[in-house]
Image (cartoon, helix red, strand yellow):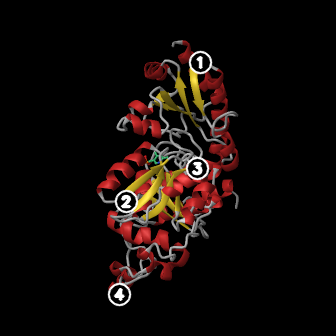
Amino acid sequence: MRDETKCLHAGYTPKNSEPRVVPIYQSTTYVFDSTKEIGDVFDEPTKALIYSRFANPTVMAVEEKIAALEGGIGAMCTTSGQGASLLSILNICKAGDSFISTSTIYGGTINLFAATLKKQGIECIFVDQNADEETIHAAFKSNTKAVFGETLANPALCVLDIEKFAKIAHAHGVPLIIDNTFATPILCKPFEHGADIVVHSTSKYMDGHAVQVGGVIVDSGNFDWTNGNFPEFTEPDETYHGITYTETYGKAAYIIKARMQLMRDYGMYPAANSAFLLNLGLETLAIRMERYCQNALKVAEYFAASDKIEKVMYPGLEGDEYHELAKKYLKGSSGVISMVIKGGKEKAIQFMDSLKLASNEVHVADIRTCVLHPASETHRQLTDEQLVAAGIDPGMIRFSVGLENVEDIIEDIEQSLAQL
Ligand SMILES: *Cc1c(COP(=O)(O)O)cnc(C)c1O
């Protein structure tokens, strides 16, 4: 199946007279004929469903669909994108370990990595994604267990050279984890470029309609966890009666371990209802992404031609710093544009408050056009230094182009710019 078809059909194939649409299994638990059968599932949890803290049929249908879209062997949904990023690291790193991340990533992820994980004894070493290979190699320590980056950074809109980072990570025997939220598997499939694990905030384009907060981790199945760096994968897990993940689950060791250990213990599994809504969004993801890209390119060209705009960041624009990387890695540059208005923060806020169609909200990648001022909203907790490292100018606006008629979006921008 191709992407448009997978969006509609992957993950759920009803049999004779079963419901056409994946049902909402709104049940916390599952019934068994005997105590022994339940005991058996505790010994080998992939055998059957026992409790919706870590597996549920509605959620699993969505997991299978997303795994199919990314070309992975398995996926696990989480209650948020933050949850997915957190568990993707915790499945590999423990106190005393470190990992490397590019600095131009989502602000919430920077907080999680730089502050919260640090308190748990896991160090994140930030590197400039455009640094030369030698500099990045030099950032590794003997306890470095993973590398993390974002395909299309929110909101700096840098495109990551995934192949460069995969090569570097693999030279050190560690996996590359990619946050593919803004690109979605429709515009980029990081596994095809050597990434090992993908995470998403499904709250963004995948849902698209702003109706559920969620996340997902996808496993390519390609990373060799038996290379000596990952004893938790290759030594018996006493909390599961001595199961050894790589021996028992082979290529699926990472994603099954994430569910069996982390989801069991942290319990961040989405409700069936949320997965049902996410699935509706996924059904139209491929065709929506196409239109987001078309609309955003027109809006980016309009911004670029305006004398009131100092700078436009949109990798789809010819002349953009990341245009060449976008041509290599992306089928389109997605729907988000970052731009800096002349006159700094004050004019940026005036522009945003004068928009009539586009709404001011803390969201992005919605079906409706929306705007946000990172320096005073999502990224206000970052220091000036962190803002610069994350690629954020105080006058920068993140403009998320929706699926309205693009002429209406541009007319709204026009009337607002005219008031500056
Ligand atoms: C929003 C976002 C997240 C966090 O996702 P939530 O669902 O809001 O927790 C992570 N990464 C990127 C790139 C995002 O845009």
Q: Are marks 2 and 1 in contact (CB under 8 Å)?
A: no
Kindly identify which residue carries mark 3. 132
Q: Which of marks 3 and 2 is in front?
A: 3
Q: Do the residues labelled 3 and 2 touch (CB within 8 Å)?
A: no
Residue behind label 2 places its C-beta within 8 angstroms of ligand 1: no
- Answer whether residue 370 is visible to the viewer in this image: yes
Q: How crowded is mark 2: few (under 14 residues within 10 Å), some or many (20 or more)?
A: many
Kindly identify which residue carries mark 4. 36
Secondary structure category for the residue under label 4: helix
Image x and y of residue 361, in percent:
43, 33
Q: How crowded is mark 4: few (under 14 residues within 10 Å), some or many (20 or more)?
A: few
Q: Are marks 4 and 3 in contact (CB under 8 Å)?
A: no
Residue behind label 1 places its C-beta within 8 angstroms of ligand 1: no
Q: Nearer the viewer, residue 28 or 239?
A: 239
* Amino acid at dot 4: Lys
Q: Nearer the viewer, mark 4 or mark 3?
A: 3
- Residue that appears at 46% across and 36% down: 388
Q: Which residue lies furthest to the top in this view?
A: 419
Q: Reading the chain from its start, which is encountered first: label 1 or label 4?
A: 4
Image x and y of residue 380, in percent:
37, 34
| Up-down relation of residue 36 to residue 187 (above or below) | below
Kindly identify which residue carries mark 1. 414
Secondary structure category for the residue under label 3: loop
Kindly identify which residue carries mark 2. 268
Q: Nearer the viewer, mark 2 or mark 4?
A: 2
| Up-down relation of residue 391 to residue 202 (above or below) | above
